Image: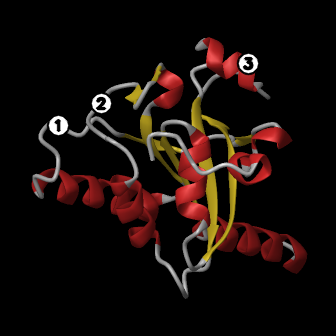
């Protein structure tokens, strides 16, 4: 393997460790919750976990792609850890309702953690177990923990939607 190829693989792995992908209902509110955290350097809203390539908002809302509205978070692990992001994830939605968040209903609004590597999977499973055992929630947590597939960024008008519209976040978050 050439040094250049090795370097590309190393950089890709390094960047993967600095990303997290979560679904917790309407992505506008979830984006807002994570964007304001110290150590979070970027948040994109989009779609993941489905079977159609390059889905549109209309495709996902129709409920026939299998995708969830999700956020892809880029973070500085020197400032905020993946575990801290998981803690925020549990606090920003109701992980006990299957395919429902606030007024939004459908599998595109499901609660899900899309892990990027074995370490994230392990941490997500431990975090889910700890959240369940803490009895913070009256019902069983139904959040899925799934290997991340392709993350498709949503259309530009969805990115930082509330800020662009000059309105306070009004989703369930």
Task: State which tag comes first along the sequence, 3 or 2.
Answer: 3
Q: In this view, does 114 lie above or below 68?
A: below
Task: State which tag comes first along the sequence, 2 or 1.
Answer: 2
Q: Distance between the residues labelled 2 and 1?
A: 9 Å
Q: How far apart are marks 1 and 3 (CA)?
A: 31 Å
How many marks can you see? 3
Tag in front: 2 or 1:
2
Could you say whether the residue bearing mark 2 is in a helix, strand or loop?
A: loop
Name the residue carrying label 1: 140
The residue at 17%/46% (across/down) is 137
The residue at 44%/31% (across/down) is 110
Q: How crowded is mark 2: few (under 14 residues within 10 Å), some or many (20 or more)?
A: some
Judged left or right of residue 110, residue 64 is right
What mark, if any, has residue 58 been given in the picture?
3
The residue at 61%/70% (across/down) is 18
Coloration of the structure image: secondary structure
**Nearer-the-camera pick, 68 or 9:** 68
Tag in front: 1 or 3:
3
**Nearer-the-camera pick, 30 or 146:** 30
Task: State which tag comes first along the sequence, 1 or 3.
Answer: 3
Proximity of marks 3 and 2: CB atoms separated by less than 8 Å:
no
| Image coords of residue 49 (percent x, y) | 57, 33
Could you say whether the residue bearing mark 1 is in a helix, strand or loop?
A: loop
The residue at 79%/29% (across/down) is 54
Q: Where, by quadrant of the figure, is residue 151 drawn?
A: top right
| Image coords of residue 26 (percent x, y) | 55, 36
Q: In this view, does 126 lie above or below 103?
A: below
Name the residue carrying label 2: 97
Q: Residues within 10 Å of mark 3 (few under 14, many from 20)?
A: few
Judged left or right of residue 133, residue 144 is right
| Image coords of residue 27 (percent x, y) | 59, 41
| Image coords of residue 107 (percent x, y) | 48, 22
């Amino acid at each position: 393997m050439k040094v250049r190829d090795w370097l590309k693989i190393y950089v890709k792995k390094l960047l993967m460790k600095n990303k997290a992908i979560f679904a917790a209902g309407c992505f506008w509110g979830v984006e807002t919750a994570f964007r304001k955290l110290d150590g979070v350097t970027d948040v994109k809203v989009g779609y993941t976990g489905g079977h159609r390539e390059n889905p549109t908002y209309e495709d996902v809302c129709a409920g026939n792609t299998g995708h969830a509205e999700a956020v892809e978070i880029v973070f500085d692990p020197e400032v905020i850890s993946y575990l801290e992001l998981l803690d925020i994830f549990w606090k920003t939605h109701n992980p006990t309702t299957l395919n429902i968040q606030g007024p939004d209903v459908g599998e595109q609004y499901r609660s899900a953690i899309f892990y990027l590597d074995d370490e994230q999977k392990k941490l997500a499973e431990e975090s889910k177990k700890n959240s369940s055992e803490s009895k913070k929630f009256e019902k069983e947590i139904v959040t899925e923990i799934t290997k991340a597939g392709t993350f498709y960024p949503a259309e530009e008008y969805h990115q930082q939607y509330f800020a662009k519209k000059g309105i306070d976040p009004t989703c369930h978050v």
